Image (spheres, rainbow, N blue to C red):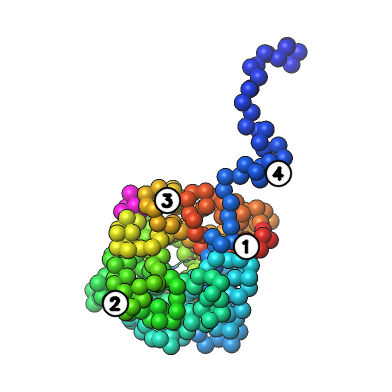
Amino acid sequence: MTGTQPHTAPRPVVRPRRLRRTAPLRRLVAETRVSPADLVLPMFVKEGIAEPVPVPSMPGVLQHTRDSSRKAAREAVEAGVGGLMLFAVPERKDPVGLAATDPDGILNAAVADLVAEVGDAATVMADLCLDEFTDHGHCGVVADDGTVDNDATLERYGRMAVALAEAGTHVVGPSGMMDGQVAAVRAALDASGHTGVAVLAYAAKYASSFYGPFRDAVDSSLTGDRRTYQMDPANGAEAMREVRLDVAEGADAVMVKPAMAYLDIVRRAADAVDVPVAAYQVSGEYAMVEAAAARGWIDRGRAVAETLTAIRRAGASIILTYWAEEAARGLL
Ligand code: PBG
């Protein structure tokens, strides 16, 4: 065929491009929106520092002092962020993570600070895990043979849940991937009268390379890995089993983590259960975009918006992201 011959190709009757012609039209037909209220900002509070400390592998993220965490929380909530997920870095670590269950320990103190600061305007959540508090860096108690002792850890998680509830947290997020952790936490909360504290279960949490920068942010002591308790990235059916188990154990909401490499799991979870599904866009996902943007290799704002939209489209109703405040302010 040459350009001089008459046009004979059939003319399309259906033209999807019509709805993409102008920005207002595209906005009108957008199927997915991310609202500030869907976003949860993870925050790090460190004991024994006088000034906030930047996390080198997470540009823009700080290890907060108790004071600076209050201010940061207030600003995030003023921007419309729906929740805060607190992590703490204690001064002293030991084999069983005693600081986690100490009512005056840094995490419990920081929870009480934030509940006092923003507790009527946003949801305060606390990560419920021992890895920041143990000297070996594992998420639980290590037995003599070097394995992580599931049931001994459950007992510690139960106590930690009660301490966090007493500090005022609205939600606990058990993230250690021990078997039975949701049931153990729920039972401990209920037995201590904290029936109103919700459990956001890290249900499908993978043994992921994308947690690398987080381990800087919490001064992790881990050597080795978490593959005997976190999930193998190869598995999808197993994630559904974990999700259903957590719902059966009483989880009020379930989480998939990381987010971007596991959007199929987010979708399957959203289809499988009728509790809210959260997705955690983790430290490595943040660092990848920030690093590429800093080199001028991608458009930062568009990349961030695209990732959040994709996570929402996959079925997450709650998104944990280090960009929560910026995204809520619409500055992207
Ligand atoms: C465990 C925990 C981790 C993260 C959240 N909770 C680290 C891990 O499992 O090693 C990672 C979050 C992130 O990478 O942003 N307490």
Instruction: Using the image, determine if residue 9 lies above or below residue 216.
Output: above
User: Circle 4 is placed at which residue position?
Assistant: 24
Instruction: Using the image, determine if residue 89 lies above or below residue 12.
Output: below
Label of residue 191 in the image: 2
At label 3, which amino acid type do we have?
Ala
At label 1, which amino acid type do we have?
Ala
Q: Which one is closest to the eye, mark 1 or mark 2?
A: 2
Considering every residue shown, the one lying at the far top of the view is 5
- Does label 3 or label 2 sit earlier along the sequence? 2
Residue 199 in the figure: left or right of residue 320: left
Residue 314 visible (yes or no): yes
Distance Cα–Cα, label 3 vs label 4: 30 Å
**Ligand 1 location (quadrant):** bottom left
Residue 239 lies in the magenta-colored region: yes
User: Circle 1 is placed at which residue position?
Assistant: 328
Point out residue 47 in the picture as x, y percentages from the top left corner: 50, 85
Point out residue 286 in the picture as x, y percentages from the top left corner: 56, 61
- Does label 1 or label 2 sit earlier along the sequence? 2
Q: Is mark 3 within 8 Å of ligand 1?
A: no
Instruction: Using the image, determine if residue 103 lies above or below residue 3.
Output: below
Distance Cα–Cα, label 1 vs label 4: 21 Å
Q: Which one is closest to the eye, mark 3 or mark 2?
A: 2
Q: Name the foreground residue: 244 vs 170.
A: 170
